Amino acid sequence: MKDNYDRPIISLRISLTNRCNLDCLYCHHDGMLPSNLEMTSDEIYRILKIAKKIGITKIRYSGGEPLIRKDIVDIIKKTGTLNFKDISITTNGILLNQYAQDLKDAGLNRVNVSFDTLNPKTYKKITTKNFLKEAKSGILEGYKAGLDPIKINMVVMKNINNNEIMDMFNFCKEYNFVLQLIELLKSENCSDESFNNEYHVDMEPIEKSLEKLAHKIKTRNFMQDRKKYFIDNGEIEVVRPMDNTKFCENCTRLRITPEGKIKPCLLRNDNLIDIIGPIRNNATDEELEKIFIDAINNREPFYDQ
């Protein structure tokens, strides 16, 4: 199925919760929705069945921290019964020790781990917690369980971890993980430029350095022209903010919030469409499919020129 701008809808990203066991410096803190207001695993499964019917092939779960959900394995298991092409999850890794093998057995294909440093002091500064050991151990448990590929998401921050990129790369290279260097987004919680000025890193010089080291460079044309740098049998990808026309032009994803609202555009909150209400009011599959189609028809590029 395509939207009105001829963009195919192939991916659905479901935020299972906005609760988290970290309090990261750069997090936008969307608030803590009580667990009893979150979608249940059965409700999520109902949504997935409709998504499958309209042609979605890829499912990504995120949070908050999705592994906080005590029914996370059940959610993945139900997702796995629908034969999607790809099922993935974004996590901070702290609970992967507990869940990695069960998630793999339930049908999870791969995992992205938000992991910004290997240094305990830096980790505490960024997250306000002392869970570095648990996060690193969880990542390695995911590797042991056969989740592949594992991608490490490293938000690069000035005077905090911008001098640790090669340390993280060497760690990733050892286990054949992909390192994704993520340019810091400006915090919406700041009324001035202080946060951005203090922590933002210009990625251009970093990319120029990577160009000199790389024996191969690949451009991902459908992902904002992101570049992947292949260095000494390792792989680094640079992820820029999504404030450009290229991102919108190639967007193939719908999102669903923890409280069950379809989000046609990542960058807008004024056009959400409720789907959980109709589900709880015994809507038919045909009615739910129409809600999805209405959400798709509401999609338009945020940056259109």
Image (cartoon, rainbow, N blue to C red):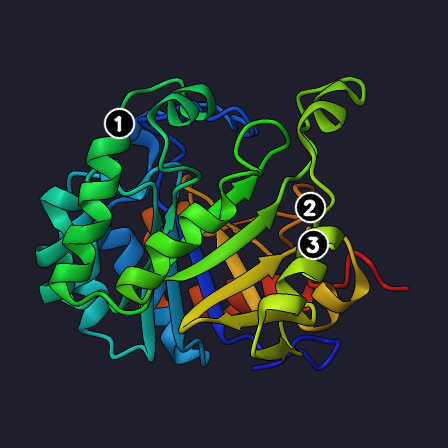
**Toward the viewer: 164 or 40?**
164
**Residue 283 visible in this rendered orientation of the protein:** no
Upstream in sequence: badge 1 or badge 2: 1
Rendering coords of residue 17 (x, y %): 36, 38
Labelled disc at residue 7? none
Instruction: Work out how far the residue at label 1 is from the one at label 2, CA to CA, in angstroms.
Output: 33 Å
Q: Residue at x 69, y 42 (%)?
A: 270
Number of numbered discs overlaid on the protein picture: 3
Upstream in sequence: badge 2 or badge 3: 3
Crowd class of label 2 (few under 14; some 14 to 19; many from 20; radius 10 Å): few
Amino acid type at circle 3 is: Met
Asked whether, in this view, residue 186 is left or right of residue 264, the answer is right
Q: In terms of image quadrants, where is residue 218?
A: bottom right
Residue under pointer 1: 131
The correct choice, above or below, for 128 with respect to 289 in the image is: above
Instruction: Work out how far the residue at label 2 is from the one at label 3, CA to CA, in angstroms.
Output: 12 Å
Mark nearer the viewer, 2 or 3: 3
The correct choice, above or below, for 255 with respect to 38 in the image is: below
Indicate the secondary structure of the residue bearing disc 3: loop
Q: CB atoms at circles 3 and 1 under 8 Å apart?
A: no
Rendering coords of residue 66 (x, y %): 30, 43
Amino acid type at circle 1 is: Phe
Upstream in sequence: badge 3 or badge 1: 1
Q: In terms of image quadrants, where is residue 238?
A: bottom right
Q: Residue at x 8, y 56 (%)?
A: 102
Residue under pointer 2: 268
Amino acid type at circle 2 is: Arg
Rendering coords of residue 82 (x, y %): 24, 75
**Toward the viewer: 263 or 274?**
263
**Toward the viewer: 87 or 52?**
87
Labelled disc at residue 242? 3
The correct choice, above or below, for 95 with respect to 220 in the image is: above
